[in-house]
Amino acid sequence: ALEDPVTERRAEAVVWVANHGRMDDAQLLLKRLHDESPFVRGYAERGLWLLWSRSGDGDIDRAMARGVEQMEAGQLAEAIATSSDVIRRRPAFAEGWNKRATLYFLLGRYRESLKDCDEVLKRNPNHFGALSGAGQIHLNLGNPQLALEFFRRALTVNPNLDSLRQVIPLLEHHLRDKGRS
């Protein structure tokens, strides 16, 4: 159904994989990020986030939900502690590292965030959130060439990241101008 010529059937298949699939099924949704239909592409992106957020362990998933609630409530130190506990208990779970990377980024702790992005990418090299996050960190650290490389990688995985599609040419222009001075 993921290859069905009818857009709605492909979208339904994406939703089914997102709701019932395992991490091994991520490749199926990654392919749909390049679908001809923007509708299917959007479902695939949301579906990947859903798929990546499931650890396979109910206790870990509840801890992750608690960490997200803490983050949304502005309790960043508590959310970091919760994410660190998730990482300690399930180090192979990439999304635990990704949540903590996000929290470190929000606190301006860029080097720690970048280390956690590296851990995410070791476990999930196609994690376009960690790729674009690492690019943003490098931009904040004054490394525009590295930022550009990460942004390009993220866009290769997920061509629907419109913000990167806008930033990349600006960054390329900046680097060309810098090279001339």
Image (cartoon, rainbow, N blue to C red):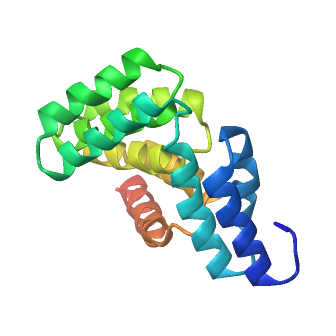
Query: What's the residue at 37%, 25% (across, down)?
Result: 86
Query: What's the residue at 59%, 36% (across, down)?
Result: 124
Residue 146 found in image quarter: top left
Image position, residue 65 (x, y; %): 33, 43
- The answer to whether residue 72 is left or right of residue 148 is left
- Name the one closer to the observer, 174 or 160: 160
The number of discs equals 0
Residue 79 found in image quarter: top left
In the image, residue 52 sits, relative to residue 56, either above or below, namely: below
Image position, residue 161 (x, y; %): 51, 66
- The answer to whether residue 164 is left or right of residue 32 is left
- Name the one closer to the observer, 67 or 28: 67
Query: What's the residue at 17%, 40% (across, down)?
Result: 108
- Name the one closer to the observer, 3 or 1: 1
- Name the one closer to the observer, 18 or 102: 18
Query: What's the residue at 19%, 52% (across, down)?
Result: 72
Residue 163 found in image quarter: bottom left
State which quarter of the image contains the N terminus.
Answer: bottom right
Image position, residue 97 (x, y; %): 40, 31
In the image, residue 166 sits, relative to residue 56, either above or below, namely: below
Image position, residue 29 (x, y; %): 70, 57
- The answer to whether residue 173 is left or right of residue 69 is right
State which quarter of the image contains the C terminus.
Answer: bottom left
Note whether residue 159 is visible: no
Note whether residue 86 is visible: yes
User: Looking at the image, which residue sits at the far top?
Assistant: 88
